[in-house]
Image (cartoon, rainbow, N blue to C red):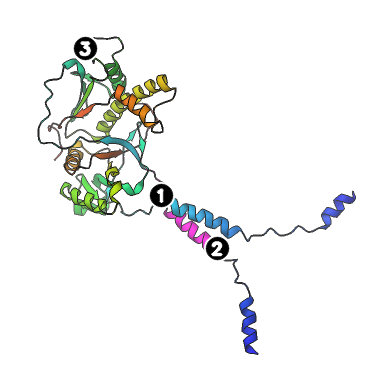
Amino acid sequence: MAKFSKKRGKSSPAISTASLPDIIFMLLFFFMMVTVLRDSDLKLSVNTPEATQLTKLDEKSLVNYIYVGRPTQQYQAVYGTSPRIQLGDKISTVDDIPLFLEQHKVKLPEAKRTRITSSLRVDGEVTMGIVQDVKTKLRKSNQLKINYSAGKRTDALD
Amino acid sequence: MAKTKTRDRMNNEINAGSMADIAFLLLIFFLVTTTIAEDKGILVKLPPWSDEEPDITKLKERNVFSVLVNAQNQLLVREEPARIGELRERAKEFIMNPSNRSDLAEGPKNAIISLKNDRGTDYDTYLAVYNELKGAYDDLWNELSQRRYGQPYSEEMPFAQRKAIRDEIPMVLSEAEPTNFGEEQ
């Protein structure tokens, strides 16, 4: 009995919040590390298809993105409705691809240049014609490592 | 007199209570802007560009598994219509030829898969077909790896083991220049 009354008598000390900023900073640094600021805003609507045999692209700095799809509503007045290619920030044609690849390449150290991957983010509804043109151009520019960007499919095929 | 007063003030600590608030603000900013969208996809190595047409007349017909996709997204596998769903099993049977049939590949090293599409084929369909053909090889590598090394085929395996498996069943997927019958204008 005596024990209990003794404990109750003591007021609980306030929890120190001095380490709270440290914890928050830790979280902050984590998010700063994993974050990739979206550098280009998409002018095309791109819904990548789904697949099962996927590989993860690890080093983001070694990847350049080529988008293919139809322009979104807001850009249809300027670019029409047929499938277009977007490199970086702007709508381009296949002839701009070599320059685009070169611009990406010069930013990287020479030792890593062989590991550059082109990620093709192509809308599922687009026909192969434009994709084929892109592929041919990539082959001619000697950029042979490509990645057909796709989501994970869970349901079975018919 | 005044001097001592300022010195006293300097000894005061800066109140760090708002540090957490500032950090929170930054944290929330990064939480909102962050996209942990990892990029996944089917990794493909394209053949180098050459102006000459590859000569395929030397190949034996039994060693070639031809897959054609037309502008209506229909499949023709070895001159018969087929569905995408059955493609993987057929490709696997063709490559390994377990029952030694005379119309399938002589062996996995001789097997060639030839894929040809139209410029009007949907990318969706093309990728599904490509996925199945790659899946057939992935499945076969997994089986072989499981039998030999007791683990599924993965990038984490020692290079020598991966190479041994890929030498045993080399992936030969050749893509022909597409036809142009149904491209939208």
Instruction: From this view, report whether residue B7 is shown above or below residue B103.
Output: below
Q: CA distance from mark 3 to mark 2?
A: 73 Å
Q: Secondary structure at mark 2?
A: helix
The residue identified by callout 3 is: B103
Labels 1 and 3 within one chain: yes
Q: Identify the residue at horizontal 33%, vertical 25% (top origin).
A: B164
Q: Is residue B104 magenta?
A: no
Q: For residue A154, which quarter of the picture? A: top left
The amino acid beneath tag 1 is: Thr
The residue lying furthest to the bottom in this view is B1
Task: Quarter of the image for the C terminus of chain A: give it.
Answer: top left
Disc sitting over residue B21 in the figure: 2
For marks 1 and 3, the one nearer the N-term is: 1
Determine contact: label 1, label 3, CB under 8 Å.
Answer: no
- Name the residue nearer the viewer: B41 or B128: B41
Residue count near mark 1 (Cα–Cα under 10 Å), binned few <14, some 14–19, many ≥20: some
Q: Residue, x 28% and y 25% (percent of image)? A: B170
